[in-house]
Amino acid sequence: MELQGMDNLNGKTLSILFFGDIMGKPGRKAFISMLSSLKEEFAADMVIANGENADDGSGITPAVMNELFAAGADVLTTGNHIWGNEDIFPVLNRESRLLRPANISSCVPGHGSGLFEHGGCTVAVLNLIGRVFMPPCDCPFQQAEEEIDRLLALTPIVVVDFHAEATSEKQALGWLLKDKASAVIGTHTHVQTADESIAREKAAYISDAGMTGPVRSVIGLDPDKTLKAFRKEIPMCFYMAKGECAVQGVHLLLDAQNGRALKITRINRPFKTRKPWKS
């Protein structure tokens, strides 16, 4: 679905693709295989993707990170699973294109936001994490206000990945930043929502961009093993689902002059493979 906002009077626009959580090897394969054609279709100047589940469903490794960058991702955001693989810890300090949530302890490595040059524009990307039904962290609303003002002093274009469980918390942050951010994009639930909107003040919004990964699954995981875990109340490991995948996310068209959202389009494209995925 495509949703349009106010007209662009100055003519210069910025096209951004944002992809929901890339889930394991199946999600990586779908992302890498389809990214080039999607970039061409939407004339994308920049690609942002959430990569916190890219390594077999939990965490990301340096090799996987490099694989996604080589495929065409410009910035990788993350969330609570960024700490799933310790090999990435030293990389977080030196790789500015890999973000972790800004509202967590200052003792941990990495950066919660960054400035990137694409399409002749400076784009700020801010990564935040929610507190409702999530591990302990600092207040995302306070952190958002502090970070957004700092970033807006440098560029009018700010894209926010809010990695959170509760829809209410995501909507509340979207409301807080409606006149400041260019877009507030929810991630984490792996279920794409149909509530994309553009505030008359400025920002595009969607509660969850969805998941890039297996379709016949429970949020990307093997449905039978997940069901067994629920029914028997046994903590489960990450068992990736197999078969057909989908690439999900949104396309953003922004006014390059003032950062105002002009269009948000949901993306949900099937990716079929002849060979079943191996665990």
Image: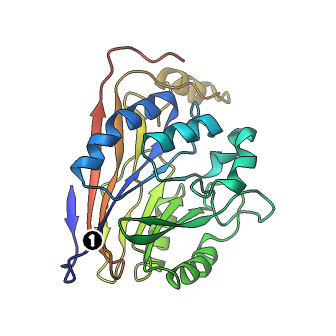
The mark total stands at 1
The relative height of residue 171 versus residue 73 in the rendered view (above or below) is: below
Give the left or right position of residue 224, taking residue 139 as reference: left
Q: Where residue 135 sits: x, y (%)? A: 69, 54
Q: Indicate the quadrant where residue 12 lies.
A: bottom left
Work out whether residue 135 can be spotted: no
Work out whether residue 77 can be spotted: yes
Give the left or right position of residue 76, taking residue 7 as reference: right
Residue positioned 35% across, 65% down in the render? 119
The relative height of residue 125 versus residue 32 in the rendered view (above or below) is: below
Residue positioned 32% across, 15% down in the render? 274
Q: Residue furthest right?
A: 107
Q: Indicate the quadrant where residue 231 lies.
A: top right
Q: How is the image coloured?
A: rainbow
Q: Give the quadrant of the C terminus.
A: top right
Local secondary structure at mark 1 = strand
Question: Which residue occupies the foreground of this view, 241 or 22?
Answer: 22
Q: Where residue 165 sits: x, y (%)? A: 53, 54
Label 1 Cα crowd, 10 Å radius (few <14 / some 14-19 / many 20+) = many
Residue at numbered disc 1: 13
Question: Which residue occupies the foreground of this view, 208 or 265?
Answer: 265
Give the left or right position of residue 208, taking residue 271 as reference: right
Q: Where residue 120 sits: x, y (%)? A: 37, 70
The relative height of residue 216 versus residue 162 in the rendered view (above or below) is: above
Q: Give the quadrant of the N terminus.
A: bottom left
Q: Residue furthest front?
A: 120
Which kind of residue does numbered mark 1 sit on?
Thr
Residue positioned 64% across, 39% down in the render? 62
The relative height of residue 277 versus residue 93 in the rendered view (above or below) is: above
Q: Indicate the quadrant where residue 122 lies.
A: bottom left
Q: Where residue 131 sits: x, y (%)? A: 63, 62
Give the left or right position of residue 40, taking residue 125 as reference: left
